[in-house]
Amino acid sequence: MNQQLPVTAILYDAVTLPFRYFRDLLNIGAPLLFVMFIAVLFALLSLEVGDSYFSNIGIAFLSIAYITAALQALVGAHRLFLNKRLPSEERVLNWTGNEIRFAGWSLLLIVCVALVSLPVVGISGVLVGSMVLGENSPQLVAQIVSLAITFPVYYFVGRWSLVLPASAIGIRGKGLSWAWSLSDGNGWRLALLMGLLPTGSNILLSLIAVEDSWLFAIFSTAISLLVATIQVGVLSLSYKFLIDNQVDEEAEDKPQIGTVEL
């Protein structure tokens, strides 16, 4: 069994990462921010033009651009947090090739988590939801019940997601079974690390949501980007801790060569 993850320390360090590496993260995320800005302009233009063919072509192009930029930003952030330096000499456009493997593992992770979690979430959701949730239920109660139902999903997400930092820094030959083994004994700690901030931010945004408000839309987008960056930091720091701990354990198990005890 691996050493227990220091949940509080990892959360604290992850929260500070966006502020410590703000300029580097802005460099890495510049293409993604640019695509998001273009998407807003395109949405406004589409409303004026009203051409469905024009809209469909634009949506397809922007979707590809968004996925590409998001992959580059995620891989770049993982590399920054693990290597403590900006990848490839501070280039804004930096496609390393690891993005393809990262995307492949992400898709496989989504499929595996869905297959494992949907039966559990579906059954518990029907049973608990029908008893607790109703049309007159307070929104906060609904959020808490939904959290209790979906929280076990983060157990699988946390354990299998450790393959993502490895693929981001170019380590090959590691898969979901390796990530599961690496996280042995830390499943629920990883669930807490991976689920706490996203769930908290979703509850907060749902409670203060304002319809048809550009100010709230900008605020919620900024919060989502900040939480996503912190989550990358959480995953990177958890991966580094477990890898370092695994190396330390293997070193302790190896016999010491070249020393003679008198």
Image: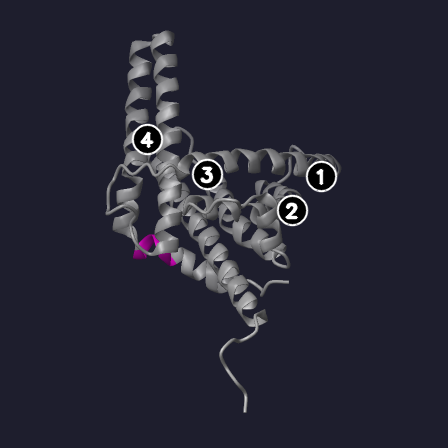
- C-alpha distance separating marks 1 and 4: 35 Å
Q: Earlier in the sequence, mark 1 or mark 4?
A: 4
Left or right, 27 with respect to 204, comes to left
Identity, as a three-letter code, of the amino acid under mark 1: Val
Name the amino acid type tagged 4: Met
Spot occupied by residue 172 in the image (x, y as percentages of width and height): 48, 44
Q: Label for residue 152?
A: 2
Query: Measured from the top left, where is residue 189 in percent x and y?
Result: 58, 57
Name the amino acid type tagged 3.
Phe
- Residue 252 vs 47, above or below: the answer is below
From which residue to which does the magenta span run?
16-20
For the stretch drawn in magenta, the main secondary structure is helix
Q: Amino acid at mark 2?
A: Pro
Q: CA distance from mark 1 to mark 2?
A: 9 Å
Residue identifier under label 1: 120
User: Counting residues from the N terminus, which is met first, the one under dot 3 or under dot 1?
Assistant: 3
Pick whichever of labels 4 and 3 is earlier in the sequence. Answer: 4
Q: Label 4 vs label 2: CA separation? A: 32 Å
Helix, strand or loop for disc 4: helix
Q: Is residue 6 visible?
A: no
Query: CA separation, marks 2 and 3?
Result: 24 Å
Relative to the observer, which residue lies in front, 94 or 6?
94
Would you name the residue on which mark 3 appears? 102
* SS at badge 3: helix
Between 249 and 118, which is closer to the camera in this rendering? 249
Query: Going from the N terminus, do you reach mark 1 or mark 2 first?
Result: 1
Answer whether labels 1 and 2 touch (C-beta < 8 Å): yes
**Callout 4: 10 Å neighbours few (<14), some, many (20+)?**
some
The disc label shown at residue 110, or none:
none
> Would you call the spot at circle 2 few (<14 residues within 10 Å), some (14-19), or many (20 or more)?
some
Q: Which residue is mark 4?
A: 36
